[in-house]
């Protein structure tokens, strides 16, 4: 008798973003394996409605409450439940019918929904790295307690995860995270003083949301990824290296205790790590463009420039200090990036603001969730004051 495979029911938090829309492409190509259960957006009601009518989720949430009527009216005939506001975003992940939650929100906003999803025992496909940067200790402890897997979506962490399959019992000597170097690779601080928002938004290899694109240009993205890796793979600071690899073909590497290094390679395409996180432990077929060595006769590697790109050094510092300092780094960076995108500050001010907030902080060694919430709130206010 033919056995029917039970589909995985997926909730996508941030379905209208870069990761969210690519996740829906993956699901559209595997309708026999996945069912969309929940879709959420911040303010892009038009695209959320379009996605809902196509994928017929059980529920949608629009972050901005003022947009509730627009979404609700459009979906009235479609038997889709509609909610609005931040609390709805955090509670919708508890729905019994959900198997896996893809966290593709941007920034600190992902923290509470991720905690709720883990508490409800949902598997997590994690794109929202800020969640682990802010509260990696709480998140990983909770996931362990609830028996929840956190499958990374970030391409570097997916690469490491893919290298570790079959090796989970073998200790890691170190990991090497690759970084493209972004649009400002090779520049010095003088050059960076005058770069514009438009310059910073031109990433050479990846099409991503605005916040992560600025983070990539400032190397803060790699800093956040270093901290993300610490929590995902239970590593010490000295086990995490960063190397600049401008072609973005080698997505990251793991070195084991016998000295052997494994790497995962491919063209830069986020659909692959998204699909791996959703499909794990299966590798699903895809028609993504294949890598050809002859198109890349030179794969190159260089040291990151920590003097020019202060953010990467600051992230290592924050990780080594621990406690609530990474939360401060993240909150200050979110405010600074927003201000840079609004053209209120220059590019180099981003790391100045982060550094000042880190120095002026009150240190909490073992923060509770409430401490993180408070630290985030206070740091945002401090960072705003530095911008005025
Ligand atoms: P985008 O800005 O493209 O998308 C963010 C999504 O979250 C959108 O659906 C947006 O809704 C929604 N959203 C944003 N803020 C809120 C809020 N306060 N409340 C509710 N919804 C909100 O971001 P990306 O897809 O680029 O990135 C998502 C996450 O994945 C980030 O943490 C990023 O670091 C990580 N990541 C992204 C990669 C990429 O290639 N893009 C690669 C690796 C990691 P709306 O559209 O309505 O504004
Ligand atoms: Mg990445």
Image (cartoon, rainbow, N blue to C red):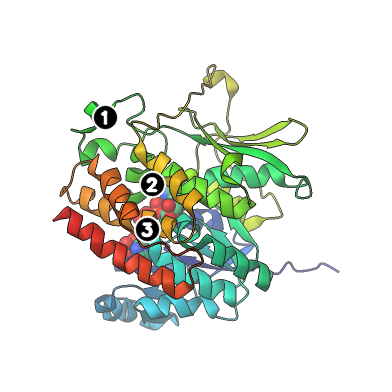
Residue 179, position in %: x, y?
Answer: 47, 35
- Looking at the image, tell me whether mark 1 or mark 2 is earlier in sequence order: 1
Numbered disc in front, either 1 or 2: 1
Which quarter of the image is occupied by the N terminus?
A: bottom right
Residue 363's place in the image compared with 173, above or below, is below
Q: Which numbered marker is on residue 208?
A: 2
Q: From this view, report whether residue 275 is shown above or below residue 145.
A: above
Q: Nearer the viewer, residue 193 or 86?
A: 193
Is residue 144 found left or right of 204 in the rendered image?
A: right
**Residue 191 rendering spot, x and y as whole percentages:** 23, 27
| Image quadrant in which you'd find residue 8 | bottom right
Residue placed at 30% from the left, 79% from the top? 68
Is 279 left, or right, of 357 in this rendering?
Answer: right
Q: Which numbered marker is on residue 179?
A: none
Q: Is mark 2 within 8 Å of ligand 1?
A: yes
SS for dot 2: loop
Q: Is residue 387 left or right of residue 361?
A: left
**Mark number displayed over residue 189:** 1
Q: Secondary structure at mark 3?
A: helix
Comes first in the chain, label 1 or label 3: 1
Residue holding disc 3: 328
Q: Nearer the viewer, residue 118 or 83?
A: 118
């Amino acid at each position: 008798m033919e056995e029917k495979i039970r589909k995985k029911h997926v909730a996508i938090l941030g379905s209208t973003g870069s990761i969210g829309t690519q996740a829906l492409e993956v699901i559209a190509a595997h309708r026999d394996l996945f069912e969309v259960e929940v879709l959420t957006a911040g303010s892009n009601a038009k695209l959320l409605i379009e996605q809902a009518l196509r994928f017929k989720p059980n529920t949608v949430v629009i972050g901005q409450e003022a947009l509730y009527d627009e979404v609700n009216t459009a979906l009235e005939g479609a038997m889709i439940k509609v909610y609005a506001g931040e609390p709805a975003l955090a509670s919708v992940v508890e729905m019994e019918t959900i198997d896996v939650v893809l966290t593709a929100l941007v920034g600190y906003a992902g923290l509470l929904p991720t905690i709720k999803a883990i508490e409800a025992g949902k598997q997590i496909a994690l794109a929202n790295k800020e969640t682990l940067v802010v509260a990696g200790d709480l998140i990983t402890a909770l996931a362990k307690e609830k028996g929840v897997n956190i499958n990374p979506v970030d391409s570097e962490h997916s690469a490491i995860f893919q290298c570790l399959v079959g090796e989970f019992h073998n200790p890691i000597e170190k990991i090497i995270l690759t970084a493209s170097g972004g649009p400002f690779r090779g520049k010095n601080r003088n050059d960076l003083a005058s770069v514009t928002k438009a310059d910073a938004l031109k990433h050479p290899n990846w099409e991503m949301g605005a916040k992560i694109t600025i983070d990539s240009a400032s190397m803060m993205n790699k800093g956040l990824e270093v901290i993300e890796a610490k929590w995902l793979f239970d590593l010490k600071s000295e086990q995490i290296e960063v190397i600049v690899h401008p072609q973005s073909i080698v997505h990251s590497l793991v070195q084991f205790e016998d000295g052997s290094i494994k790497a995962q390679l491919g063209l830069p395409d986020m659909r692959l790590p998204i699909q791996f996180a959703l499909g794990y432990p299966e590798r699903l077929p895809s028609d993504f463009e294949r890598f050809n060595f002859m198109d890349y006769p030179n794969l190159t590697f260089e040291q990151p420039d920590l003097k020019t790109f202060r953010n990467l050094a600051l992230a290592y510092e924050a990780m080594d200090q621990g406690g609530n300092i990474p939360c401060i780094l993240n909150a200050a960076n979110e405010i600074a990036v927003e201000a840079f995108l609004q053209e209120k500050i220059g590019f180099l001010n981003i790391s100045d603001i982060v550094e000042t907030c880190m120095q002026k902080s009150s240190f909490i060694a073992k923060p509770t969730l409430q401490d993180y919430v408070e630290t985030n709130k206070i740091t945002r206010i401090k960072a705003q004051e530095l911008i005025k």
